[in-house]
Amino acid sequence: MLDIHFIRENAEIVKAGAAKKRIEADIDRLVAVDDERKRLTQELETKRAEQNRRSGEIQRAEGAEKERLLEAMRQLKAGMAESEEKLKEVMGEWQRLMLSVPNVPDMSVPEGESDEDNQEVKRWGEPTRFDFKPKSHVELMVAAGLADFERGAKVAGFRGYFLKGDAVLLSNAVWQLALKHWGAKGLEPMLVPSLVRREAFMGTGYLPQGEEDLYKTQDGEYLAGTGEVATMGYYMNEVVPTAELPVKFLAFSPCFRREAGAHSKDVKGLIRVHEFFKWEQVVLCRALHDESVRMHEEINRNTEEFIELLKIPYHTVVNCGGDLGLGQVKKYDIELWVPGEGKYREISSASYFHDFQTRRLNIRYRDEDGSLKFAHSLNSTAIPTPRILVSIIENYQQEDGTIRVPEALVPYVGKEVIGRSA
């Protein structure tokens, strides 16, 4: 959420930012409603002061004068009740409008309508070539007994899956290497809840706009699609000790997504499943733009280095305005080469938000001058499973249907080749 004072003083900048993100936000209406909110608030404050003054007069009055003052007090209270009801209605609209205002994207964010307009900023490795016709991960995993998608759908429904045997060892190996890699970067590992209250989803910006992609319980909680939500809620309504900044977490959790609007996309395999597991980097730092930019580059590079350990070709793109979410100032996507499709596929997103999330969540720290400030927040996918298995299996496949294990994962898998000959 942006500061209303910033919105009023920079209305044209906020409008331009919304237009760049292709997000509709009625800034003029918000300013008009804010004017009404301030007017009604001042009106109520004046009436409350009058109420206090008249209460003293009533205590001192007697007889007819007291009755006259009591009648005037009743009329004043009736007027206050009417003003309070009007303010309640105005505040409801004000809050809805405030929640619809997107963060202003960085000037370096390119123009564009969708992910098709994202711009490549880095490429590492050459696309894997084979002297045989490569197979998809679905073909390889089914033939090698590493996955069962039919029974997955029978048990869990559309996009359900079972991982089996060596695929489980491979997933666990990815997790173990992630702990080692990000632990050496100074991130504190945490197992975080997937079942999270609405407040944390509102605070991180996943609600109200993204509700269609979330699973909701009858008790009003939601299943999170990323560990970012619970991790950001960790310091909700708290003042973080300045000496602890920057706070760097490596959060692990099961994740759940409806994949609303993607029913015809990636209907087979492990690319777009409803239930998965993910390590997520979450950072809180001081409210300095330069520090946010530096941390953004750092957490994105952490994931690039992990992919390089696996020796999988990738490229990094900077997301265009139309591919940014409500709160993101800037975002990078890392996309891995998928031989079966002959293209790059997203594996990680790294974003920074300035104080957009922390203002909603009321996460502050005390600056050197003693003043309280909202921290800046950032997050980035560390590594998701089972999606990473797609690129590992397809890039390391052999002609006989077995899969070589990336060298960095061999100590955790316990073997150099997995699967069985097709």
Image (cartoon, rainbow, N blue to C red):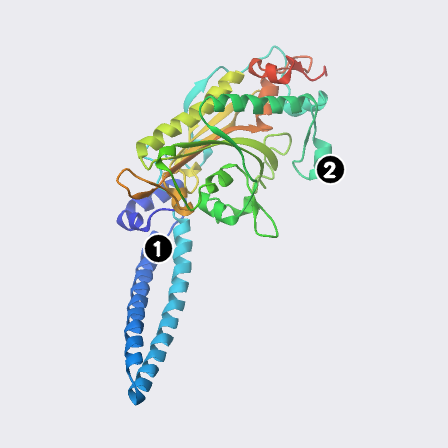
- Label of residue 30 in the image: 1
On the image, the x and y values in percent for residue 223 come to 57, 43
Q: Image check: 302 left or right of 34? A: right
Q: Which residue is drawn at 31% across and 89% down?
A: 63
Task: Evaluate whether residue 22 shows in this view.
Answer: no
Q: Which residue is drawn at 33% across and 46% down?
A: 15
Query: Going by the picture, which residue comes out furthest to the bottom?
Result: 64
Quarter of the figure with the C terminus: top right
Q: Is residue 312 above or below residue 240?
A: above
Q: How crowded is mark 1: few (under 14 residues within 10 Å), some or many (20 or more)?
A: many
Q: Image check: 373 left or right of 332? A: left
Choose top left, top right, bottom left or bottom right for residue 75.
bottom left
Query: Going by the picture, which residue comes out furthest to the top?
Result: 131
On the image, the x and y values in percent for residue 110 come to 36, 32
Q: Image check: 242 left or right of 306? A: left
On the image, the x and y values in percent for residue 187 come to 46, 28
- Mark 1 to mark 2 CA distance (whole Å): 49 Å
Q: Residue at x 50, y 40 (%)?
A: 229
Name the residue type under label 2.
Lys
Secondary structure, mark 1, is helix
The residue tagged 2 is 154
Q: In this view, does 201 lie above or below 159?
A: below
Task: Evaluate whether residue 179 shows in this view.
Answer: yes
Name the residue type under label 1.
Leu
* Nearer the observer, 92 or 264: 92
Secondary structure, mark 2, is helix
On the image, the x and y values in percent for residue 80 come to 36, 72
Q: Which callout, 1 or 2, points at the residue further toward the start of the chain?
A: 1
Contact check, label 1 and label 2, Cβ < 8 Å = no
Choose top left, top right, bottom left or bottom right for residue 298.
top left
* Nearer the observer, 286 or 139: 286
Q: In this view, does 401 lie above or below 357?
A: above
